[in-house]
Image: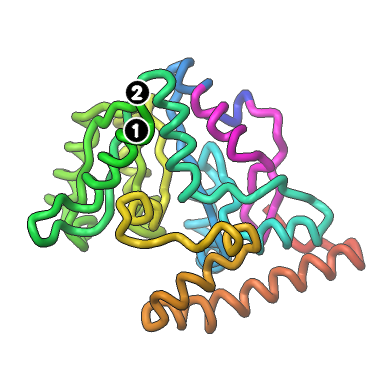
Amino acid sequence: MLRSYSHTRRVPVGGLPIDPVTEDEVVARVLTALERGRGGWIVTPNVDILRQVARDKALRAQLSAADLVVADGAPLIWAARLAGRALPARVPGSDLIWSLSRGLATRGGSVFVLGGTPAQGGEPDGARRAASRLAAECPGLRIAGAHCPPFGFDHNPRRLRSVCARVIKAQPQMVYVGIGFPRQEHLIASLREALPSTWFLGCGAAVNFVAGDVQRARPALQKAGLEWLDRLAREPRRLARRYLREDAPFAAALLARSLHHRLTRRPAHRA
């Protein structure tokens, strides 16, 4: 595993250990590992993922075993800082899909894009459009494959085997899996044994961002940690319950525990 030669000590946030690394450091570590023939797995938790992990021990154990766990959500950064155990910066999966592709492109590396929206009106599906854009904007990057599996494929053993076989046959150096949490993490777990020299990034909506099917928030909102607010404004019916009734109270409690730790020195977050 990558951690065998990593010198960073993970920072526990809400029960999940986070690697205190920057985006550039993630890319450097992945490229170094690939040179040594080592694959791995990157997890990018945000508040919603952390909330689900907090109530599911098996899921928490699964994510903790990833080679790199980096903070996608700004509240995770704030919580760590309040507790006096700082993380250097956000490392969103929607940024990593670009920086990793650029890094791979310098070495003629290959990627497989999995996820996105289905094809409509004769247009290619989201995975193929995302792959085409990555190839166009990252000269030297090789596209090993792109596939938008049908919704619910992972609940059908035959379809799941078919999707896995397609990725395995392509033998990519990097796989971007954007089918939503935790389905993408379960799929990655199914693929890792067959592709020990491949890296995997569970990247959620990043495939849709790259394909142009979903627009990212303005950079100012991203920097302020308010990207969720932009997404809520665009998809209120789908996201209101998750963001306002579930994630917001969890984030508030997370920050309160961190502040309490800072003031009392009692444990706030355990790995």
Residue 64 position within the rendered picture, expressed as x and y whole percent measured from the top left:
56, 47
Q: Nearer the viewer, mark 2 or mark 1?
A: 2
Residue 60 or 228: which is nearer the viewer? 228
Please give left or right for residue 91 compared with residue 58 in the image: right
Which residue is denoted by mark 1 in the rendering?
A: 193
Q: State yes or no: residue 19 in magenta.
A: yes
Residue farthest left in this picture: 122
Looking at the rendering, which quadrant does residue 68 occupy? top right
Which residue is found at the position 53% from the left and 43% from the top?
A: 65
Q: How many marks?
A: 2
Is disc 2 surrounded by few (<14), some (14 to 19) or many (20+) residues within 10 Å?
A: some
Is disc 1 surrounded by few (<14), some (14 to 19) or many (20+) residues within 10 Å?
A: few
Which residue is denoted by mark 2 in the rendering?
A: 140
Q: How is the image coloured?
A: rainbow
Residue farthest top in this picture: 36
Of marks 2 and 1, which one's residue comes earlier in the chain? 2
Badge 2 element: loop
Q: Is residue 97 above or below residue 198?
A: below
Residue 266 position within the rendered picture, expressed as x and y whole percent measured from the top left:
86, 63
Which residue is found at the position 20% from the left and 45% from the top?
A: 147
Q: Amino acid at mark 1?
A: Glu
Please state the extent of the stretch shown in magenta in the rendering.
Answer: 6-31
